[in-house]
Amino acid sequence: MEQITYKEFRNFLDSDANEAEYFGYSKEDLISLKERLEGLRERFEICESRIESDREKIKRAYSDISGISYSDYRKTLTFDVGNSSYYLTKVEEKNMYKINWYASCEPSIFTNIKLIKHINIGRKFSEEIDNIVENSVKYFNKENTIESVSSIFVLEDSYFSSALNCCDYPFFFIDKRTLVPEEYTIIPFKVEYDTLPKITTKDKQKLLTKIMVPRGFLN
């Protein structure tokens, strides 16, 4: 990934040129990152329409579940319960799901006792879980790392949100449904944070229209 100073970044952001024009690259077969994100949102909404009813059915049966999401990295379905999480993996030869535990806080006997009622979730809702996994996998069946034309910016796309990296460091996250960047910013530039003017949500929204990426498949 190419590097850029904060001053160079600010000059680019404040200019009227898009990334290809500003850095002198061909504009052929490129679209803005905002357009690419709109295509990803359309893909996400199609997958969600096939998943949502089964996810809500499980959450009605287990009211303490706050989130259900597929991890392309782990190849598992993760269930969030308070400060803890567990995931299910399918045992193909038995055609059933096995529950595995891990916690975002320090593991304890209490945590496992509290979640023990979930132990049969893979058996009770195997069809629903199959459907959630199947359609989540369809979403990830594409290029999930999208590099900009200058290689300064890279989008790491996940299911509910996407992370924009800059200079090989995380920069900010973008909500998949609204395409609005999160307010929280991780500064990727080699300067003291307190010396930088604030990078606003409006700045980030403008940046998404200026970054240029290969057209690829929009959804």
Image (cartoon, grey):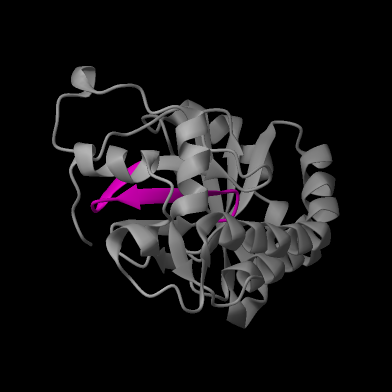
Name the residue rendered at 19%, 19% in the picture: 195
- Residue 46 visible: yes
How far across and how far down the image is residue 133, in percent? Answer: 66, 66
How far across and how far down the image is residue 190, in percent? Answer: 14, 37
Left or right, residue 125 beside residue 71: right
User: Which secondary structure type mostly characterizes the magenta part of the structure?
Assistant: strand
Left or right, residue 42 beside residue 170: right
| Residue 59 sits above or below residue 168 on the image | above
| Residue 201 sits above or below residue 219 on the image | above
| Residue 95 sits above or below residue 86 on the image | below
Q: Is residue 76 magenta?
A: no
- Residue 101 visible: no
Q: Residue furthest front?
A: 16
> What's drawn in magenta, residue-wise?
158-171
Q: Quadrant of the N terminus?
A: bottom left
Q: Quadrant of the C terminus?
A: bottom right
Residue nearest the viewer, comparing 127 with 112: 127
